[in-house]
Amino acid sequence: MSNIVFPLGIVSFEKIRTEGYYYIDKTEIIAELLRKTFEVNLITRPRRFGKTLAMDTMASFFDIRKDTRKLFSGLHIEKYKEICGKWQNQWPVLFLSLKEVDDKTFDQATKKLAVNISDLYKEHTYLLKSNKVDPADAELFNKIRYQKADSVDIQNALYILMRMMQAYFGKQVIVLIDEYDVPLAKASENGFYDDMLNVVRGLLGKTLKTNPFLKFAVITGCLRIAQESIFTGTNNFVSDTITGERFNEYFGFTEEDVHKLLQDTGYGKHFDEIKYWYNGYRFGSIDIYCPWDVLNHVNALQDNPDTEPKSYWEDTSHNGILRVFIELANSEERQDLAVNDKFEALLGGDCIEEPIEQNLTYDTLHSSESNLWSLLYLTGYLTQAAPISLQDSAPVENGKFLLKIPNEEVKLIFRKTVVEWFHAKVATVDRSELFRAMWEGNAQKATVILSDLLFNTISYHDYKEDFYHAFIAGVFTGAGYYVESNREHGTGRTDIVVRDRSSRRVMIIEAKRANAPDLLEAGCRDAVRQIDDRRYAAEFVKGYRSVICYGIAFYNKECLVMKFGTAEN
């Protein structure tokens, strides 16, 4: 058992390096940035792929107020002597993260932004001690610092601070802005997108466009917002996305990184399961693992070597994207979004071909099917399928991409979201006809109604019995019945027990998955035989007026209902 400490949730490069946390060296990103830098460098990657740590690493390297040679000692960047001499701790740095500006109202969001900028100003109070700084700027500085500034001052805050920093240091400023699109994503979800867009455009516009105090800027986010929305007029602008070839090995873990990690911890035998669960992302021509998942799982292995893989990314990503997509695709208002067949193909392990729009705006994400697929791709729910050979081009035809679900973890998120959506949808459907048929013992009618409900959900090819158990339970839940699943009755565990206490009747259901359509009847007979052999109904004979038992067999979206018997008291 290893005792390596992983920096889970820690994004401070200095803390990782000084407090003994495990670190996979990604510092060569600095050399790659400076090899071909632009005035504004926008880097987009899905969440939990190390964007914030990369930005904090850059800030530590460039910041003129620090001496970070010990922090970078022995790391890849150290071999670039000329770069280190010219750039390490030689430039003023302004580093702002917008990831916390995620409030549900415009007023709360702008207050949070003002707090963030106030905190940024507090880091630079040394500027007030210099006679090089314009007194008028010093006065504005204190207004912003003490959160007494108006909205215009807030939008000019970065420009003002950069002007003061250049006056103090006599050098242009490197600007690092992390998760720039979080405020816009939250604003879009909560209905104040246009107002927040004006704020973000104002904040970044003057900072990035023809700013004499700017050396260069690096901006990270999840999506590349259309240039005309925020970056209009920005010269010497480049964006690096997951479809390109630049920076890909620096966000996420390569297979080499994972092998080294497992070698260092002694868990090499777990490589295949980690690859199955957490690999599969393709950035440019490189296969990438989600670092958040890998570190969490290996950390769990240290506590218990028999720990099974699970979804860690689900708790940190915006899974509402999937739910919104499915609801839109199945709404009466959006009959143009015929995506259920494509969802089924993806869940079955197949690929789909879709055009990808990389210049998106949050207010138009739901305006077309291609935008929705693009959103799932750019946020990490889908990835490019690897080409047959390295010479093959990833786009399939006419700008389309071959897309798939990256790995088992994300597939489980898809399944869970589909099931939750279906249960919510069923709750709005009039099921009284189904309930009447089943309480009356009309198996033939119940078969037709359940088959129709199944047809209207999203299926996947590797159905298991637990899916069908959840399906049946979902049909009865929320309809005034007491529903039990997998509870001990008789000499075994019943799949579903539905109790109608007001009418003193109970329904026992055993579900089976058939391997072919012509085996549905055999599956039903097997189910009712189990109910009889294990005496599931015995405890209900006393106290209930009627006990009715069903065996239900499923094959994909087909089902057959068979009544076992009704006991009347």
Image: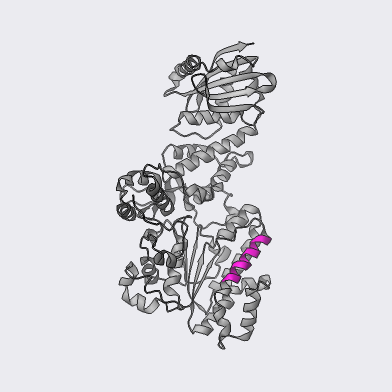
Q: Nearer the viewer, residue 494 or 374?
A: 494
Residue at left offset 33%, top offset 67%: 75
Q: Is residue 254 left or right of residue 136?
A: left
Residue 474 sits in which quadrant? top right
In this view, the residue farthest toward the bottom is 131
Residue at left offset 34%, top offset 71%: 73
Return the x and y of residue 472 as percentages of the image width and height.
56, 27
**Magenta highlight range:** 107-119
User: How are the colours assigned in the image?
Assistant: one colour
Return the x and y of residue 239 as percentages of the image width and height.
46, 63
Q: Is residue 161 left or right of residue 275?
A: right
Residue 347 sits in which quadrant? top left
Please determine whether, in this image, residue 248 is positioned above or below residue 296.
below
Q: Which of 40 and 313 is in front in this view?
A: 313
Return the x and y of residue 219 as percentages of the image width and height.
49, 66
Return the x and y of residue 439 as percentages of the image width and height.
63, 18
Residue 344 visible at all: yes
Residue at left offset 31%, top offset 52%: 259
Question: Magenta: predominant secondary structure element?
Answer: helix
Residue at left offset 53%, top offset 26%: 487
- The quarter of the rendered structure image containing the C terminus is top right
